[in-house]
Image (cartoon, helix red, strand yellow):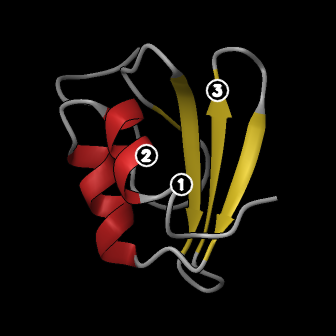
Amino acid sequence: SCKAGHFCQDMFGGMIRLRSSCIYAVDYSPETRSLRVWFHNNGTYTYFGVPLATYVRLLNSSSPGRFLASNIKPYYSRA
């Protein structure tokens, strides 16, 4: 189970569950700067070119879903 805070594991090395009403979990690769996002509705997207600093801000955001919508979706390509 999650400890205090918004994320539940180390920053790298696998899926990190978030405490978010829309985002189930994330996974980030610093080598490729790709951010994979799993949503509670079973959708999954990968965003490309996301800087490490942006990923850290997502993990520490009080509202990860709002942060994703405002700071990642408009700026990075996804698949």
User: Residue 6's mark?
Assistant: none
Of 49 and 71, nearer the camera is 71
> What SS does tag 3 mark?
strand
Is mark 2 in CB contact (under 8 Å) with mark 1? yes
At which x and y percent is residue 32?
Answer: 66, 83
The crowding category of the residue bearing disc 1, from other C-alpha atoms within 10 Å (few below 14, some 14 to 19, many at least 20), is few
User: For the residues marked 2 and 1, what is the alpha-carbon distance in whole angstroms?
Assistant: 6 Å
Quarter of the picture holding the C terminus: bottom right
The crowding category of the residue bearing disc 2, from other C-alpha atoms within 10 Å (few below 14, some 14 to 19, many at least 20), is some
Of 2 and 34, nearer the camera is 34
- The earlier-in-sequence mark between 2 and 1 is 2
> What SS does tag 1 mark?
loop
The residue positioned 36% from the left and 49% from the top of the image is 70
User: Residue 73's mark?
Assistant: 1
- The earlier-in-sequence mark between 1 and 3 is 3
In this rendering, would 10 be left or right of 36?
A: left
The crowding category of the residue bearing disc 3, from other C-alpha atoms within 10 Å (few below 14, some 14 to 19, many at least 20), is some
Quarter of the picture holding the N terminus: top left
- The earlier-in-sequence mark between 3 and 2 is 3
The residue positioned 19% from the left and 29% from the top of the image is 5
Can residue 33 be seen here? The reply is yes
> What SS does tag 2 mark?
helix
The mark lying in front, picked from 1 and 3, is 1
Q: Is residue 16 above or below residue 50?
A: above
Q: Is residue 43 above or below residue 44?
A: above
Give the amino acid type for the residue marked by disc 3 in the picture: Phe
Give the amino acid type for the residue marked by disc 1 in the picture: Lys
Which residue is the site of mark 3? 39
User: Residue 68's mark?
Assistant: 2
